[in-house]
Structures are given as C-alpha cells and as structure tokens.
Amino acid sequence: MSDWIDVCDLEDVPLLGSRVLKTGTIDIAVFRTSTNEVYALENKCPHKGGPLSEGLVHGKQVTCPLHSRVLNLDNGTVVAPDVGCVRTFATRVNEGRIKLKVTDKG
C-alpha cells in the first residue's frame, strides 16, 4: 500500500532547513535546498541516531548535528569514508504544496 501525503506549503520549510513529519511508526525529515528541491529522509542518523532534521543542509547533503556524518539527501547514503544509509521517501511539489510518498512495507 502506498499513498501520497500532503505535508505542508513549500514556504513552510525554510531554505536550507527542514521540517519533521511524525507518522505512527517513523519520523521523517523533509528538507529544502537553496534551489527549492525537496527531499525526505528518515530523521535518524545511522551512526548514533542523531536527529537529521537539526543538521546543516548544504547543497544536496545534510550534516548530522551529533557527530558530523554527512548524508546525501537524494539517496540517503552516508558520504565516504563513513558508511551507512537511511530510508528515503519520494517527494513532489504540486501547486506550492509538498507531497510525500510513504510506502508501507508490512
């Protein structure tokens, strides 16, 4: 089962910032780059569980606020030499609204 969820207005997420969407089972960080691209990752760094939504957004990456792991926003992978990845979610912007596709893998 999969659904597109209406999250918020694009302008509700600051440039180079994020907003957290809390679902019943997972917190999702929705990021906005300086060029208005929108990405969504599980809000939990694979290293020590740091809140990625509180990290520094730069280009198409976010730096975890706990131990400075850098993750790619487009695919959720940690930048080498570190390793790991987080779950990503498809996003789209339609008429100024951010939509997020959440897939139930159960």
Image (cartoon, rainbow, N blue to C red):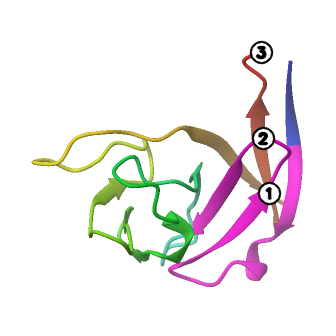
Write down the region rendered in magenta: 5-31
* Image position of 32 (left or right of 100): left
Q: Earlier in the sequence, mark 1 or mark 3?
A: 1
| Residue 84 placement (x, y as % from top left) | 31, 39
Tell me the crowding category of disc 3: few under 14, some 14 to 19, or many 20 or more residues within 10 angstroms, Cα based. few
Q: Which mark is residue 25?
A: 2
At 69% from the left and 78% from the top, the residue drawn is: 13
Q: Secondary structure at mark 2?
A: loop
How far apart are the alpha carbons under marks 3 and 2? 12 Å
Q: Report x, y in % for residue 39.
A: 57, 55
For label 1, count other residues whose C-alpha is less than 10 Å away and answer few (under 14), some (14-19) or many (20+): few
Say if the magenta span includes residue 9.
Answer: yes
| Image quadrant where residue 85 sits | top left
Left or right, residue 80 beside residue 49: left
Amino acid at circle 1: Lys
Residue extending farthest to the front is 48
**CA distance separating discs 2 and 1:** 8 Å
Residues at circles 3 and 2 in contact by the CB criterion of under 8 Å: no
Of mark 3 and mark 2, the one earlier in the sequence is 2
Residue 106 has which mark?
3
Residue appearing at x 63%, y 60% in the figure: 29
- From the top left corner, tell me how far across and down residue 64 is, in percent: 38, 67
Mark 3 is on which residue type? Gly
Looking at the image, which residue is at 26% across and 69% down? Answer: 68
Q: Residues within 10 Å of mark 2 (few under 14, many from 20)?
A: few
Amino acid, disc 2:
Thr
Task: Say left or right for 44 vs 105.
Answer: left
The residue identified by callout 1 is 22
Tag 3's secondary structure? loop
Which of 26/78 is in front?
A: 26
